[in-house]
Image (tube, grey):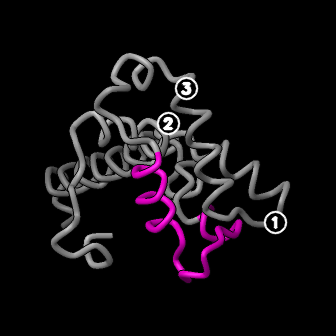
Amino acid sequence: MSETLGENDPGMTLQEFIAYQYFFNQLDVVHAQVSMYKFLDKEKFTDIFNQFAAKHPYCVREKKGIDVVRIANVLFEFLDEDESGELEPEEIDLFMPVLMSEPKDEKIKAEAKAHFAEMVAGAKGWYNKILGKV
């Protein structure tokens, strides 16, 4: 976005950044809309963001420091990978939290199994060393 605006880029306020993060964490709403319509143009995406901002407690509380249209434009440009001016399902899928990483409990389980396997291997090595089977 800075590349498009150059020196006229006003940056982003802290309130806008936080609102952006809250919205980004709820991309499933956008994904549902994209699935229904097959794509979203910037106007429809901005409407979705406006609806989000009108209801989200943080956005309602901090509305003076949030330029909803500007945040929607920044996020739209970020998500529109092919720069077609429309968001397709594939572009949203790239950023869906569920698709980006495995669930935390699965990750913890895999790490625990790996750690356990290391401990077993170490114990076997120690056992063989004690018995002289090295």
In primary-sequence order, the first of circles 3 and 2 is 3
Residue 54 numbered tag: 3
Q: Quadrant of residue 4?
A: bottom left
Amino acid type for the residue under numbered disc 2: Asp
Q: Residue at x 39, y 36 (%)?
A: 19
Q: Nearer the viewer, mark 3 or mark 2?
A: 3
Main SS category, magenta section: helix
Q: Secondary structure at mark 3?
A: helix
Q: Residues within 10 Å of mark 3 (few under 14, many from 20)?
A: some
Front-lying residue, 5 or 120 = 5
Residue beneath label 2, please? Answer: 105
Front-lying residue, 19 or 89 = 19
Numbered range of the magenta stretch: 69-93
Extreme residue in the right direction: 36
The location of residue 18, given as percent across then percent down, is 32, 36
The location of residue 3, given as percent across then percent down, is 27, 78
Q: Does the stretch in magenta take in 91?
A: yes
Residue beneath label 1, please? Answer: 38
- Could you tell whether 106 is left or right of 112 in the image? right
